[in-house]
């Protein structure tokens, strides 16, 4: 059987590939420390789990509206008002099976074949794949460590063309941990004001994992409100990765388009997860803040250790739980057995030599870096940094 050509436009995400390789080596007896996946190592808070159990006992085990329970969408609207100062009605909100489905719904609802989509790099691996599935054209804007991997207004202005249909970015950013300030977002908003034909997807899934203060959303600027899709979810801030619930707030016509799209793919998100998410969004956020404090402690440790390693260049992530380390100074070096020619070689070298699973930066649009997740225990991180320092020191 001949498979569909659209499969040729995408590849397996490197994050999933590296996690899979790590599991395979672990199954063979290797002591692998997995620093590849962005998954909190904490348990879902107890009050959320109780709400799920109570929902099952109460009979919330049936199909729900495709867009989600009205009570959940109201809880999301209340959260957006409380935490972000954003006003949305429930018919401007859709609930999906993970934030990734929100992104897919939005991209497939907006992008036509040939439409141009701007994505600043480094970026999360799935953004470009979704555009390719929609047969759009990706225009990358490369951002570097000198601007903390953040896009500047002048670069944005230079990139927008009459063919530009959509702009996708994240703050806090995966993979760099960079967080846009209100002033930085305002500068971008001034550019977008001059180009009303460009829609914006703002991926804010790491909102609660912020080490520098209040989260800022580009949707706060009134002139952009009717063309911004805010994407968020439960996975990161509530340690609910396996529960699979994301949500999007945006213009009613886009939400309706996403509902139509989702109705043909998955229909509604799990009823039980939806009830648990109401408890998460309306309940005590202390567990979330406690997790963020732990991530900050881990960040400080990992970045401190990376800064001590000769040849490694690193920024200070202000959010999320990743270190995006520039390791290009090792290109051309060898430990006598393996030659490091590029970022993928480095990831594979660390996997097989140090038994650390990372992700090569090319997957995120920067071939000079690797992404290191610190969403694991301090004990594992301490051992991982010892192994990494030893492996890098062996390269001459």
Image: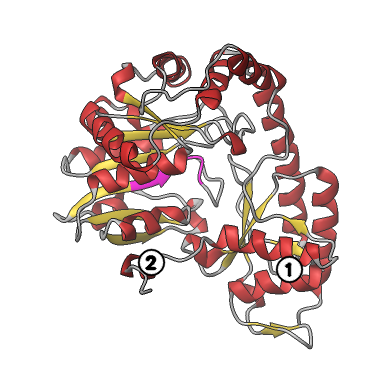
Q: Is residue 312 on the magenta stretch?
A: no
The residue sitting at 64% across, 74% down in the picture is 329
**Where in the figure is residue 173, as x and y percent of width and height?**
50, 45
Helix, strand or loop under label 2? helix
For label 2, the crowd category at 10 Å Cα-Cα, with few meaning under 14, some 14 to 19 and many 20 or more, is: few
**Mark 2 or mark 1: whose residue is earlier in sequence:** 2
Viewer-nearest of labels 2 and 1? Answer: 2
Query: Can residue 10 be seen by looking at this rendering?
Result: yes
Quadrant containing the C terminus is: bottom right
Residue 31, quarter of the rendered image = bottom right
Q: Which mark is residue 7?
A: 2
For label 1, the crowd category at 10 Å Cα-Cα, with few meaning under 14, some 14 to 19 and many 20 or more, is: many
Give the distance between the C-alpha atoms of the residues marked 2 and 1, in whole angstroms: 28 Å
Q: Is residue 172 on the magenta stretch?
A: yes
Quadrant containing the N terminus is: bottom left
Q: Are marks 2 and 1 in contact (CB under 8 Å)?
A: no
**Where in the figure is residue 102, as x and y percent of width and height?**
39, 39
Say left or right for 340 vs 235.
right
Helix, strand or loop under label 1? helix
The boundaries of the magenta stretch are 168-173
Query: Can residue 88 be seen by looking at this rendering?
Result: no
Q: Which mark is residue 351?
A: 1
């Amino acid at each position: 059987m001949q498979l569909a050509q659209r499969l040729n436009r995408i590849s397996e995400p490197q994050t999933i590939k590296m996690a899979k390789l790590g599991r395979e080596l672990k199954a063979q007896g290797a002591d692998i420390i997995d620093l590849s996946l962005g998954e909190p190592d904490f348990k879902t808070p107890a009050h959320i789990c109780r709400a799920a159990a109570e929902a099952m006992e109460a009979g919330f085990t049936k199909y729900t509206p495709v867009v989600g329970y009205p009570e959940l969408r109201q809880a999301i609207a209340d959260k957006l008002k409380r935490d972000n100062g954003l006003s949305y009605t429930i018919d401007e909100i859709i609930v999906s099976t993970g934030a990734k489905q929100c992104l897919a719904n939005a991209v497939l609802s907006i992008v036509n074949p040939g439409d141009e989509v701007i994505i600043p790099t480094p970026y999360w691996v799935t953004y470009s794949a979704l555009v390719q599935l929609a047969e759009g054209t990706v225009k990358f804007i490369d951002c570097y460590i000198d601007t903390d991997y953040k896009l500047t207004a002048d670069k944005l202005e230079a990139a927008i063309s009459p063919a530009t249909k959509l702009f996708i970015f994240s703050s806090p950013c995966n993979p760099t941990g960079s967080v846009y300030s209100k002033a930085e977002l305002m500068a971008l908003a001034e550019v977008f004001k001059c180009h009303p034909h460009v829609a914006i997807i703002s991926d804010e899934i790491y909102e609660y994992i912020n080490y520098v203060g209040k989260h800022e959303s580009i949707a706060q600027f009134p002139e952009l409100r009717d063309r911004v899709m805010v994407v968020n979810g439960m996975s990161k801030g509530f340690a609910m990765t396996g529960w699979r619930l994301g949500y999007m707030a945006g213009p009613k016509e886009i939400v309706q388009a996403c509902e139509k799209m989702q109705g043909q793919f998955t229909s509604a998100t799990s009823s039980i997860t939806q009830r648990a998410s109401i408890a998460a969004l309306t309940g005590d956020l202390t567990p979330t803040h406690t997790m963020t404090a732990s991530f900050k402690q881990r960040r400080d440790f990992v970045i401190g250790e990376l800064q001590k390693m000769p040849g490694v260049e690193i920024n200070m992530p202000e959010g999320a739980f990743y270190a995006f380390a520039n390791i290009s100074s090792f290109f051309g070096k060898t430990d006598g057995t393996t030659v490091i020619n590029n970022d993928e070689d480095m990831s594979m070298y660390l996997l097989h030599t140090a038994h650390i699973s990372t992700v090569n930066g090319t997957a995120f649009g920067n071939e000079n870096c690797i992404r290191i997740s610190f969403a694991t225990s301090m004990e594992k991180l301490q051992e991982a940094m010892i192994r990494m320092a030893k492996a890098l020191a062996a390269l001459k």
